[in-house]
């Protein structure tokens, strides 16, 4: 009976020691003995952010009892994600916790990506920890804004100029300034007026002035007008024109 009780207590202690660790790296340092190793521990859950949002999580350096080296920390962050480590290096007499400040910039793509943090000891093996960041796709463009063009193609003769009216409609909660830019096929020049809109939240007409060169081939062509808000994802609207001979 005593052997069974001792075995049950041992299993219980082992299970308890593994709880709450979250993500951890492979051992670094002089890994021939566990006493001279170190391990990076991070949160078990992904870091969830909206574009433009910042969150700070804690990472921990877990040292073996004979590991007395300074560990320098490097970070490799994905597109649209900014990461700040504080402190960037941890000495043997410093605390074990490191603050990881993660910001999803306005241009951060939606979805899951990995932040790669490397711990470099003074000697021995480096080790790395991956933290998952999940950027939420909170934008429903129909709720943020829409840029609408005529539903049918505008006919323009070779060598002529026409102005096409587009309409910007902000959503009920959209209050951001915006820039506008147009791109056209070769031989067609375009100008957007105004090319900047303020954050009034009201509908606005946008004039697209289109000049078709004399050498432009007759037929259908597409002009792309991109609206870029102060934060979040840009939206491109296609404007169709039909070029005819004079």
Image: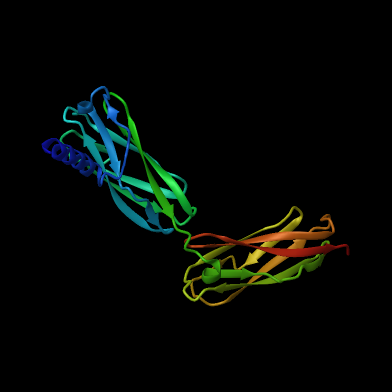
Pick whichever, 110 or 150, lies toward us.
Answer: 110
Looking at the picture, does residue 139 appear above or below residue 16? Answer: below
Tell me the quadrant of the picture where the C terminus can be found: bottom right
Q: Residue furthest front?
A: 1
The quadrant in which residue 121 appears is top left
Residue closest to the eye, 211 or 75: 75
Is residue 194 visible in the rendered structure shown here? yes
Residue occupying the point 37% across, 51% down = 46
Position above or below: 183 against 78: below
Can residue 108 be seen at all in this image of the molecule? no
Its colouring scheme is: rainbow
Residue 149, horizontal then vertical, whole percent: 68, 69
On the image, the x and y values in percent for residue 133 come to 40, 50
Q: What residue is drawn where x is 29% and y is 31%?
A: 27
Residue 119 in the image: state x and y as whole percent: 31, 34
> Which residue is at the front of the view, 178 or 116?
116
Specify the farthest residue to the right.
246
Q: Position of residue 14 (x, y in %)?
A: 21, 39
Q: Nearer the viewer, residue 127 or 225?
A: 127
Question: Is 24 on the left or on the right of 133, as rendered?
Answer: left
Left or right of 17? Residue 170 is right
Q: Quadrant of the N terminus?
A: top left
Residue at 73% from the left image edge and 54% from the top image edge: 185
Which residue is the extreme one toward the top?
A: 32
Q: How many labels were placed on the picture?
A: 0
| Image side of residue 98 versus residue 154, left or right | left
């Amino acid at each position: 009976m005593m052997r069974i009780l001792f075995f049950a207590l041992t299993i219980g202690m082992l299970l308890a020691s593994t709880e709450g660790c979250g993500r951890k790296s492979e051992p670094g340092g002089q890994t021939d003995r566990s006493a001279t190793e170190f391990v990076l521990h991070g949160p078990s859950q992904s870091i969830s952010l909206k574009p433009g949002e910042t969150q700070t999580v804690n990472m921990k350096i877990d040292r073996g009892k004979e590991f007395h080296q300074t560990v320098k920390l490097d970070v490799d962050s994905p597109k649209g994600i900014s990461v700040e480590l504080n402190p960037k290096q941890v000495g043997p007499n410093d605390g074990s916790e490191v603050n990881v400040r993660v910001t999803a910039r306005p241009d951060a793509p939606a979805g899951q990506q990995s932040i790669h943090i490397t711990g470099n000891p003074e000697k021995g093996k480096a080790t790395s920890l991956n933290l998952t960041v999940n950027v939420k796709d909170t934008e429903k463009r129909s709720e943020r804004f829409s840029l609408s063009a005529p539903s049918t193609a505008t006919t323009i003769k070779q060598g002529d100029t026409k102005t096409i009216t587009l309409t910007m409609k902000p959503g009920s909660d959209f209050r951001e300034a915006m820039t506008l830019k147009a791109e056209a096929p070769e031989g067609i020049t375009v100008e957007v007026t105004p090319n900047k809109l303020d954050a009034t939240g009201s509908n606005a007409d946008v004039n697209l002035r289109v000049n078709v060169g004399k050498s432009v081939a007759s037929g259908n062509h597409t002009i792309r007008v991109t609206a870029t808000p102060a934060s979040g994802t840009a939206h491109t609207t296609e404007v169709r024109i039909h070029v005819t001979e004079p």
